[in-house]
Every structure is written in structure tokens, then in C-alpha cells.
């Protein structure tokens, strides 16, 4: 594929259900010309572009033939309401699900040639919890996901364990080896054990799990290094 300029477009969408505006960043892959392509939706989406450099990395990987062409959508987080939106028991979690499914997806489908049979999702920490919630609520859309350092606290583990059948799910999981005592704004947590437990739950419910570990703690500097490998596994040609 010939070299081209990296292309990222920005939209501002007013959400009726959330009662606020959300910014959406869209990475448009090189060579996109009308053919319906896969799309990866990312929670904490602006950070995927800034801290994770996902557009630059994906662009280079696509040109090198290491990643199938795909759109990547970053859904901006409302930091003040992050837990309310992302957690299974968050105060407006249902509204956030509805925003993405009923407002965000139709808005972007009307502007880009996105393949509705190849919609994927990615999240880190509490964003990984939100990603699994979409798997449970919309299994017809989201059955290949990227879960980095998930904040899979025991109540969320129990919620996923209640799922009858997750045999359609493929999950790429990554957890840092130093996350047994991961420092976050909310405290210090053993994310290593939480992710091991969630891996076993997902597999018990029939999911295909690609589980990865490596050096590092609960920070973007670690996750950034694993984005292309994860994307290359979840995005189908």
C-alpha cells in the first residue's frame, strides 16, 4: 500500500440521553474509498489517540501490512462522570450504553462506510468493564474486544459469570506484571488477580481468550506498546 497522510476527523455530537456534547475522533484508514471496513470503538477515546498514539500506530501498521484497514473511533470520556458511565452499577450506565448504540453508531454509520458485521470495541481499566457490558447487552454487534488492565472488581466478575453463553466472544486481554499493586486515583488495587479471575470466567462461559502479560504498571506508556498487536488480533480481514 502506498504511503499516505494519516487522517483523523473530529465530530461533536449532542447526546439527548446524556444531556451533553461528546467529541468523537475517527481514524480513517489509508485507502478507505467506499468499501465497508471494520470499526473499533474505544472508551476513554481521546486518550487512545493522544496517550496511546493509536492513529499513528494503526496508520503505520496498515501501510506495512501488519493490520487490516479499519476505522478507529475514540469516544471522549466525561471525566467527572466516568464511573457513572462505565461501571455496571454506574448511575447513568444504561444511558451511556444507549448513547453509544442509538446515537453514536448511527451518527457515524451515516458518514463512513463502516461494516455493521465487524464492529469491535476496546477499553482500558474501567473502560474494559464498559466494553464487557456492551458484549452482554449487544452481542450481535460486539463479539471481538480488546481488554487492557480491566478494573474487574468482584461484583463485575459476578455479573459476567451470570452470562449463559459467551461462545461468540473473542477477547484479547493484557495485564501488566506490576499491577498486583496498581496505583489509581481511587486507590491501590490488585488488577493482576482481577484479570486472572475474569479470564477464567470468560473461558468458563465459552469465550475464546487470548491472554497476555508483560512488564509494566497501570499506565498508558505500557498499553501503548501493545495496541497494534491487540488490534491485529481482533480486527478481521
Image: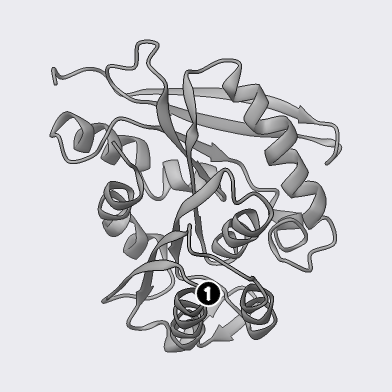
Q: Residue at x 53, y 44 (%)?
A: 45
Q: Residue at x 64, y 85 (%)?
A: 154
Residue 197: where, in percent of width, then height?
Answer: 49, 85
Q: Residue at x 31, y 75 (%)?
A: 216
Please, what secondary structure does the residue beneath circle 1 have?
loop
Q: Residue at x 61, y 82 (%)?
A: 187
**Nearest the camera: 98 or 206?**
206
Residue 190: where, in percent of width, then height?
Answer: 50, 88
Q: Does 169 appear above or below 6?
A: below
Q: Does 202 appear above or below 14?
A: below
Residue 149: where, in percent of width, then height?
Answer: 45, 70
Q: Is residue 182 left or right of residue 135?
A: left
Q: Quarter holding the N terminus?
A: top left
Residue 105: where, in percent of width, then height?
Answer: 63, 31
Q: Does 106 appear above or below 190?
A: above
Q: Is residue 72 left or right of residue 134?
A: left
Report which residue position mark 1 lands on: 205
Q: Quarter holding the C terminus?
A: top left
Q: Is residue 179 left or right of residue 127?
A: left
Q: Is residue 207 left or right of residue 10?
A: left
**Nearest the camera: 82 or 93?**
93
**Which of the 4 image quarters holds residue 72?**
top left
Amino acid at each position: 500500500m502506498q504511503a499516505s497522510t494519516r487522517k483523523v476527523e473530529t465530530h461533536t455530537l449532542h447526546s439527548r440521553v446524556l444531556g451533553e456534547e461528546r467529541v468523537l475522533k475517527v481514524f480513517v484508514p489509508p485507502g478507505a474509498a467506499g468499501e465497508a471496513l471494520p470499526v473499533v470503538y474505544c472508551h476513554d477515546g481521546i486518550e487512545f489517540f493522544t496517550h496511546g498514539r493509536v492513529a499513528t500506530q494503526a496508520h503505520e501498521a496498515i501501510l506495512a501490512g501488519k493490520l487490516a484497514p479499519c476505522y478507529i473511533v475514540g469516544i471522549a470520556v466525561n471525566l467527572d462522570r466516568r464511573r457513572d458511565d462505565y461501571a455496571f452499577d454506574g448511575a447513568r450506565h444504561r444511558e451511556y450504553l444507549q448513547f453509544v448504540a442509538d446515537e453514536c453508531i448511527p451518527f457515524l454509520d451515516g458518514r463512513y462506510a463502516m461494516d455493521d458485521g465487524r464492529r469491535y470495541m476496546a477499553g482500558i481499566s474501567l473502560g474494559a468493564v464498559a466494553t464487557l457490558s456492551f458484549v452482554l447487552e449487544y452481542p450481535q454487534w460486539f463479539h471481538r474486544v480488546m481488554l487492557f488492565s480491566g478494573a474487574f472488581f468482584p461484583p463485575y466478575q459476578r455479573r459476567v459469570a451470570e452470562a449463559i453463553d459467551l461462545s461468540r466472544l473473542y477477547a484479547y486481554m493484557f495485564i501488566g506484571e506490576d499491577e498486583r499493586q496498581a496505583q489509581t486515583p481511587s486507590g491501590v488495587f490488585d488488577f493482576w488477580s482481577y484479570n486472572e479471575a475474569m479470564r477464567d470466567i470468560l473461558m468458563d462461559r465459552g469465550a475464546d481468550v487470548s491472554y497476555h502479560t508483560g512488564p509494566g504498571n497501570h499506565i498508558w506508556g505500557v498499553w501503548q506498546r501493545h495496541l497494534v498487536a491487540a488490534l491485529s488480533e481482533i480486527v478481521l480481514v
